[in-house]
Amino acid sequence: MTLAILGAGPAGVGAALQAARRKLGRVVVFEQRDSPGGNAGSFDIAGIRVDYGSHRLHPTCDPRVLADLKALLGDDLLERPRHGRILLRNRWIGFPLRPLDLALHLPKSFILGAAADVVRKRFVPKPVHESFASVLEAGLGRTVCRDFYFPFARKLWGLDPSELSPVQARRRVSANTPAKMLRKTSGKRFFYYPRRGYGQLFESLCDAARNQGAEFLFHSRVQAIEHHEQRVSSIHYETAESSGSLDCQLVLSTLPINHLVRCLNPPQPILDAAGRMLFRGMILIYLVLEQDRFSEFDAHYFPEEDIPISRLSEPKNYSASSEPRNRTVLCAELPCDPLSDTWTKTDAELGELVCQSLSVAGIPLRAQPLQVITRRLAHAYPIYKRGFENDFALLDDWVGGFENLVTFGRQGLFAHDNAHHALHMAYCTVDCLNSAGEFQWDRWRSHRQDFERHVVED
Ligand SMILES: Cc1cc2nc3c(=O)[nH]c(=O)nc-3n(C[C@H](O)[C@H](O)[C@H](O)COP(=O)(O)OP(=O)(O)OC[C@H]3O[C@@H](n4cnc5c(N)ncnc54)[C@H](O)[C@@H]3O)c2cc1C
């Protein structure tokens, strides 16, 4: 049997390792980039390993996955304390939240407003049309929503909170009631991080999969998938110089679901639904600075709208690295639409935008950056626009009609999940294969219900 895996992000490499270990047949992975890790990969800038924005491995990772990662990385998997802060109404609040810090640093008007909202919300009538805005306001009250979640939502997803589906509030905001928020203040305050960047997790999984016989075709973009009578038969792909195809008996896809569907040449209503599935893009703006360190913090969060970037991270503070001396990199996250004017701004313009943002935040740079480098992610976040559920269900059902094609991972299930969820999905997907290499759909349906309960960690 030949098993084709589409995409070598966390979900793809996780599935490749598990399938290769099972020795079910030939395992071939198609990846358009030059390395594994997808949005969770790493690369070098100025001698420092950097990620596509702030990435942490959360301790809530599935134990089986975590055990594999610990075994593969050994001492390279560091346990790091979380040390971030949020700028709210010109005050810095420690993140993760701590009750004492909140009491000392939150503006009194904010605390009083939030407390009054807890009483007031008992008398607020249930809205006729639920949305991200109505669910969060019912749970957290107006003050927290107006000052924190709503501007942050507009920045992250580019839509007004009333245009977003209630699913976005339930899946994306884990602390969506005061009780859950309080519980979070006593949650785990550490994360795992590999010595050589977050992407080391997936480079190690990729190496392990290769050692078990899996083949990785990098620089290979999947363009079309051939099928007959509800069975997929071959993958067509392009590299910079040529094109090729591979006959296969089973396809595990982690591609964005709308791209997967287009590859299958679907009927018009399915194509239309694919066109309505929206992803938010993100530009990562890296500033190289001539100093040992910019700050002691791993990440700064900017929920308010006068600052266009959503987060700033300093990679050296994630890996606790002191090398190289007199050099550090900052990574600013700028959510935006791939079709907007912002997307095509030059590196110099984007560098200037970050410098201005940091000045407004009260943490200006000491000197001009030595270098500005940018990277663009076209599929950073799924956008749960109200009504997206119907379009997703349409695509999911149509893809589900193929006997030997499975879609999973963050892009494949249009889920706002963490990398450890994507890995967990990958392990579950391969678990559904019996020893004859047949996919057990009943088992898969039960896993899919479990995936609905994933809670996204920040
Ligand atoms: C800014 C940011 C911060 C994040 N922070 C965290 C964090 O702290 N902790 C955490 O756990 N998660 C975090 N995440 C989420 C994490 O990045 C994702 O959960 C994870 O990358 C999902 O893995 P995946 O394999 O499902 O998808 P992806 O990583 O998107 O991988 C999909 C792969 O498919 C490839 N592909 C797409 N189309 C084609 C094609 N046509 N042909 C061939 N290959 C193709 C892509 O190149 C990519 O490699 C963050 C995400 C973002 C954007």
Image: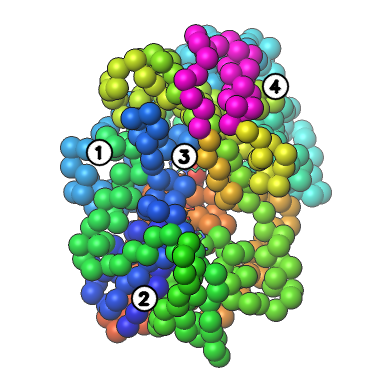
Q: Circle 4 sits in a helix, a strand or a loop, which is it? A: loop
Callout 3, which amino acid? Answer: Tyr
Q: Residue at x 55, y 43 (%)?
A: 376
Callout 4, which amino acid? Answer: Asp
Q: Residues within 10 Å of mark 1 (few under 14, many from 20)?
A: many
- Work out how far the residue at label 4 is from the one at label 2, CA to CA, in angstroms: 49 Å
Say whether residue 57 is magenta. no
- Upstream in sequence: badge 4 or badge 2: 2
For mark 4, what is the residue?
Answer: 306
Q: Residue at x 47, y 81 (%)?
A: 234
Callout 1, which amino acid? Answer: Leu
Answer yes or no: do the residues labelled 1 and 2 have beta carbons within 8 Å?
Answer: no
Answer yes or no: do the residues labelled 2 and 3 have beta carbons within 8 Å?
Answer: no
- Upstream in sequence: badge 1 or badge 3: 3
- Upstream in sequence: badge 1 or badge 2: 2
- Upstream in sequence: badge 1 or badge 4: 1
Q: Circle 1 sits in a helix, a strand or a loop, which is it? A: strand
Q: Which mark is residue 52?
A: 3
